[in-house]
Image (spheres, rainbow, N blue to C red):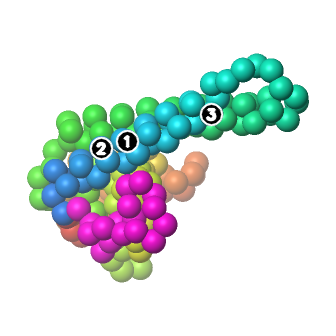
């Protein structure tokens, strides 16, 4: 399993982190990259208020981009904090873990976390999603029930955690 570069470089891949320390380092590297991107966008927004309408439109777009980056950075900082305070034992699902589930069609592997932790060929379950919420704290062998939408209830069996 490989992960795309934390800086988002095209075609750059690294080995998937296997320990909590490696997962945390990946998240922190992604945070650093986002903060550097934010600094670059901030530099683009700082300028004079003079210019024609097109010049001001570019500044508006940069401000919108800056706001979106701020949201991603805040979310990632929250995720890093939650990751640091979660139980990373071998048989309990926690933030950043790769978890193998049986959703009824055989085993499938997911990463519990943000898209920042997405691995090539492995889907991400965000901790705020119905299934993600049900999985956090579940143990290998547990069957969790979650509701993807009103009136629908589904089960998932935790097969493995790594």
Badge 3 marks a residue whose secondary structure is: helix
- Confirm whether the magenta stretch covers residue 2: yes
Q: Where does label 3 land, which residue?
A: 44
Of 146 and 4, nearer the camera is: 4
- Residue 154 visible within the image: no
**Residue at position x 40%, y 68% in the image:** 12
Q: Where does label 1 land, which residue?
A: 31
**21 shown above or below 77:** below
Q: Residues within 10 Å of mark 2 (few under 14, many from 20)?
A: some
- Residue 28 is marked as 2
> Quarter holding the N terminus?
bottom left
Of 48 and 151, nearer the camera is: 48
Q: Residue furthest top?
A: 49
Q: Quadrant of residue 74?
A: top left
- Confirm whether the magenta stretch covers residue 41: no
Q: How far apart are labels 1 and 3 at the CA level?
A: 20 Å
């Amino acid at each position: 399993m490989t992960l795309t570069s934390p800086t988002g470089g095209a075609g750059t891949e690294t080995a998937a982190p296997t320990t909590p320390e490696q997962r945390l380092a990946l998240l922190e590297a992604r945070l650093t990259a986002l903060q550097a991107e934010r600094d670059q966008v901030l530099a683009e927004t700082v300028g004079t208020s003079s210019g024609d309408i097109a010049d001001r439109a570019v500044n508006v777009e940069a401000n919108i981009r800056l706001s979106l980056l701020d949201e991603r950075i805040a979310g990632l900082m929250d995720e890093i904090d939650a990751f640091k305070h979660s139980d990373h034992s071998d048989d309990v699902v926690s933030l950043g873990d790769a978890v193998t589930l049986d959703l009824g069609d055989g085993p499938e592997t997911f990463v519990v976390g943000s898209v920042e932790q997405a691995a090539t060929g492995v889907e991400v379950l965000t901790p705020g999603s119905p299934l993600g919420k049900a999985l956090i704290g579940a143990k290998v062998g547990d069957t969790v029930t979650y509701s993807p939408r009103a009136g629908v209830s589904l089960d998932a069996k935790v097969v493995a955690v790594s």
